[in-house]
Image: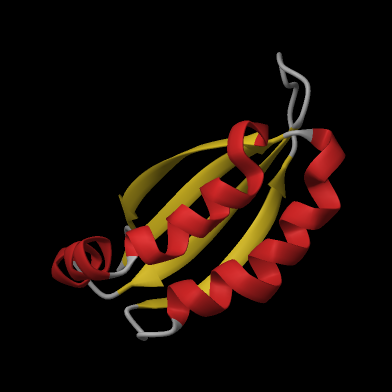
Amino acid sequence: MIVFNTTFHVDEAIQDDFIEYMLQEFIPMATKSGLLTYPRLARIFGKEEDEGLSFAMEFEVADIIAMEKWNAEESNIVYAPLMERFKEKIIGFSTLMQTIDY
């Protein structure tokens, strides 16, 4: 299984608005096609050098082919409104991870 994670660093002043947007808008848009499943939004604890808070937005995806399809067809539709809404008050980076069963 593939885990698709985006880590966001968010200005503390927009924390509540960010969380509400992620739960009410972002997750439903991201999972609409069924390519991304099992969404989980989590607060990241740790010492931050900059002001603000960090969050991890995580989804499961069946395989790399499904991830590439989502990136090509849906990612801009999902991420563009997020970035437009919060502008410079949010930054993020994405990571793909493969789970290892033991």
Q: Position of residue 8 (x, y in %)?
A: 58, 41
Most distant residue in the top direction:
49
Q: Quadrant of the C terminus?
A: bottom left
57 w.r.t. 27: above or below: above
Residue in view at x 45 percent, y 54 percent:
80
Q: Position of residue 3 (x, y in %)?
A: 38, 60
Residue in view at x 75 percent, y 58 percent:
19
Most distant residue in the left direction:
65
Q: Is residue 102 visible?
A: no
Name the image colouring.
Answer: secondary structure
Q: Position of residue 12 (x, y in %)?
A: 82, 35
Residue in view at x 62 percent, y 72 percent:
25
70 w.r.t. 5: above or below: below
Report the number of discs.
0
Tell whether 70 sits left or right of 79: left
Q: Position of residue 60 (x, y in %)?
A: 40, 70
74 w.r.t. 4: above or below: below
Q: Is residue 93 visible?
A: yes
Most distant residue in the front direction:
84
50 w.r.t. 80: above or below: above
In the foreground, 8 or 48: 8
Q: Quadrant of residue 31?
A: bottom left
Q: Quadrant of residue 34?
A: bottom left
Q: Quadrant of the N terminus?
A: bottom left
Residue in view at x 39 percent, y 57 percent:
4
